[in-house]
Amino acid sequence: MRVLRIVSIAMFASLVLSAAGCINSTFKTEPTKSFIPSSPTSTINSTVTQESSCLATAASSQTMWATASVIPHENIVPTPRPDEQIYTDPAGWYSVIFPGDFEPTNLENRFSKDNRYIKFGYLPDLGNVAGINNVCAWLGNIIEEDPEKWIVDWAFRPGSCSISTKQDIPFQVKYEVFDNPDADPGHRFVYVKTSWRDCPIEYKFSLLNPIGQKHTQELDLINAELLTEWENIAPILDNVTVKEYILPAGSNPYREMLISSLPEEAKPYWARDSYTPSVHRSTEEPPAENILESLGYEMKYPDGINNYGQLFRDGRLLFDPVWKTNTYKFDTDSEIIYAIEVVSEYGKNEAYLVLNDIIHQWSYSHQDPGFPPIIHQDELLWIRADEEWDHVQIINSYQEVIFSFAINTEPMLSTRNFLNWDGHWVWVLRDYVIVDGEILNEVLGFQEIYYWRLIDGKPSYFFRKDGRVGFSFDGKIYPLEYQNIAVYLCCGYAVNNPSAEDNSVRFFLLIEKVNGIMSFWILGEKS
């Protein structure tokens, strides 16, 4: 049972007639209404006749999703048409224009017309999530019961995100979530949920952003009450030392490489003046060609160029043409397992898997996350993008789906790590961690988890809970008095990402409540 709260608030959406499956006929609209949830519904009489209705085009393969317009940074309430009504949030954060023919149902805060309905409210438990796309990932993978049927729209749209059911489902459902960063966490994210069978729903949503109400959250100092609350999640990490270095005013990890601002003893080993780069290269992993040959396979290139080749087994031609091969070999207690991925042509998904000399039909996509398979309970597990690129899946060598996640970014960018740890398979995504099919965010109540890795063979990661950043090591947690950590930085600024060294973890934190001062922390084990 999902325990995350969704606080419903009466809000509405508007019917718009369009060519996406709606055909005109005549009906009489309801008068324009203005809804104020804190008082009885008031009605302003203004009757108008309009030719409009919704009928199905059953054979249509196209679906028009509900749409919404966001008006940022304007304290202006739009004026509805005579056949529309308007809802204005009593807290003053937003307004919605919607049609007058949607009626209340026996379900709280849900309004319907024929085979369509609309429902709305806040997402208070997600108010401290850093990115709005994470909110939609929560909805699709944790709040809703069946992630397989949900699609997260990962196209970037400032200030909103959406998830929807796959189009082969008879009744379409869609969430649209709007971000008002000026609101307090309980009112920051507003959702509008719509459902229809034949004719989709359109509505108009506006952020009002009242002047003088910009919200600034301050964290309390760590105290006994907070520690007691966090101990209900996991034991508190007490065997730890903390070193903090305040950086010069105006330091910004997203705009400058801050390692040079640190004293010598705080720098990672590779940034110290005494560091001498090594030119030694590990030879533990033999080249793929050597593995192929040791298994009795050989790649040949008739044109003499490593372009398209041919794959032979003991001198017998198996595949022609071959664009690329990936070879993996695992030693288990009972047998040696080897797998050869064979991709026929560049740009095509046709592929084969040779698993211990048995050839299987296989799938390949350039959007597959670039991680090798792992061995788990004597079988190989693979990480793959599905055909529509809206889910990334853990599959076995027979393409049976072990776990599926509705992603909020491109499949190839979704995964940070995929590994076998202490008999468990671990899938690290951006802001989510899944262990043996359980989403740790949901299990532990952490809005975000990032930088999961092993330190001395034990799992460590950062997380966000109720607006506060925390650190976890070996099943214990440590609360920090900060709201943000520098993470996921790219290119040259990647040196500002967290790093692990000598049983310690090093990271940059932004002290929001002290004029944006940057701080560099080293958490280490007590000696």
Image (spheres, rainbow, N blue to C red):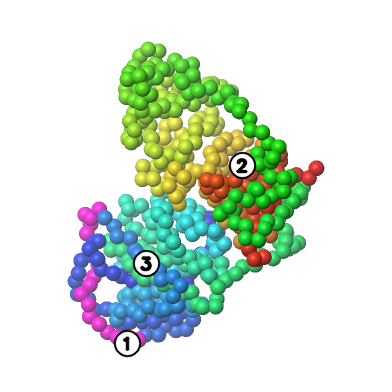
Residue 32 visible in the current orientation: yes
Give the amino acid at mark 1: Asn
| Residue name at image x 20 percent, y 69 percent | 24
Q: Position of residue 348 (x, y in %)?
A: 32, 35
Q: Position of residue 77 (x, y in %)?
A: 41, 79
**Vertically, is 511 above or below 349?**
below
Looking at the image, tell me whether mark 1 or mark 2 is earlier in sequence order. Answer: 1
Does 45 lie within the magenta span?
yes
Q: Identify residue for label 1.
A: 45
Q: Can you tell which mark lies on residue 68?
A: 3
The image quadrant where one finds the C terminus is top right
Looking at the image, tell me whether mark 2 or mark 3 is earlier in sequence order. Answer: 3
Give whichever of 227, 316 is nearer the camera: 316
Q: Identify residue for label 2.
A: 453
Kind of element beneath mark 1 = loop
The magenta span reads: 44-61
